[in-house]
Amino acid sequence: MLSLPASALRFIRRRKSLLILLPSLIATGIFVYAFIGTSFFFSLTNWRTLAVDLSLREPIWQTYVDMLHMPRFQADLRNSIVFTVLFIVFAMVLGLSLAIFLDRKIAGQSFFRGVFLFPYALSFIVTGVVWRWIFNPETGINLVFDLLGVNDLLSALGLDPLAPGWTTDPDVVLSLNRALAAAWPQAAQWQIEWGIPVALIPVTIAATWQLSGFVMAMYLGGLAGIPRHIRDAARIDGASEVRLYRSVIIPMLTPITISTAIILLHVSLKIFDLVFAMSGVGPGFATDVPAIFVFEMMFSAARYNLGTAASIVMLTLSCLVIVPYLVRTFRTRE
């Protein structure tokens, strides 16, 4: 039987955790960080056709400069910002409202919890197809909305009925171009109109419908962790139910709110399948997002340097969200 020296045994005992993690660390280093570095290198090259060309561009950042001056990528950045803000606000408000509704211990609580959480079990592809049918009258679903009076209500509010125009309307409302140009002269170089694309609203509604159940589940976990005596003490002090949630319970859910917002922000920055299935790039790139831009540059246009540059931008945006969250989490644990 082979016996190891005592020094080797001591080294193994001390480094046992490192040795256990070593295969995973090697695989992560190769298939994650090495590939990220390779993608970044490709974004600096002249690889713009099917023929491989790994010579560096001059200047080296020219691909990024060209991409930022493309009207389509400018529209992608606008859409990402607009979609992220609307999606997070709507999903958080709706999810919190559902959680408070279930926290009231209503009859059939388990049934409603399952109903509200069910959309989260679906894939974004399924959600995109279903909501595309809803906003497309040619499928016959619009007849249901006519019978229920939904389209009449939208018309009374001055909006268009549920129709293809919702996902094919190139208009941008609440334009900010003049305000941006006045506050930031460089904004005059942007070739797209900053505001809220009408075609992006149905996409936001679909994403909110799917992720609000996840937000609800997060808040229900937080509500379950609030001690009962805190609620009772607030009621004894004369706080109404509205005041109880507004001044006591919701502030105590701040850690849940931050964590959930970070997760939703990460989802919104890399959204692809929902938009692709529901509306694609949309009219005038009204619903285009960076992920679709990367997909088409890589697999349709063979602009590999441009596609990898856009993917690096997406990675950077995600890191700007995830890294501060991880740093905050580690400091809290310490």
Image: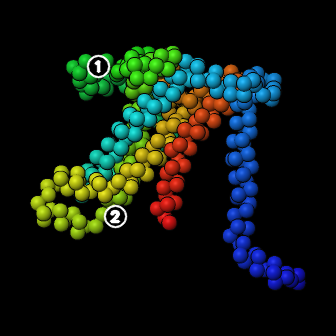
Quadrant into which the N terminus falls: bottom right
For badge 1, the amino acid type reads Leu
Q: Residue furthest left?
A: 238
Which of these two is toward me, 149 or 313? Answer: 313
Identify whether 153 is placed above or below 92.
above
Give the quadrant of residue 52.
top right
Which of these two is toward me, 137 or 250? Answer: 250
Residue 192 at least partly seen: no
Q: Earlier in the sequence, mark 2 or mark 1?
A: 1
SS at badge 1: loop
Residue 110 x, y percent position in the rendering: 32, 56
Give the quadrant of residue 236.
bottom left
For badge 2, the amino acid type reads Gly
Residue 330 at least partly seen: yes
- Residue occupying the point 34% across, 46% down: 95
SS at badge 2: loop
Q: In screen coordinates, is 237 left or right of 297?
A: left
Q: Residues within 10 Å of mark 2 (few under 14, many from 20)?
A: few
Q: In screen coordinates, is 186 left or right of 222?
A: right
The circle drawn on residue 225 is 2
Front of the two marks 2 and 1: 2
Residue 268 x, y percent position in the rendering: 48, 38
Q: In screen coordinates, is 96 left or right of 267?
A: left
The answer for how far apart the CA atoms under marks 2 and 1 are is 43 Å
Q: Which residue does the numbered mark 1 point to in the structure image? A: 159
- Residue occupying the point 35% across, 21% down: 174
Identify whether 29 is placed above or below 202.
below
Residue 152 x, y percent position in the rendering: 24, 21
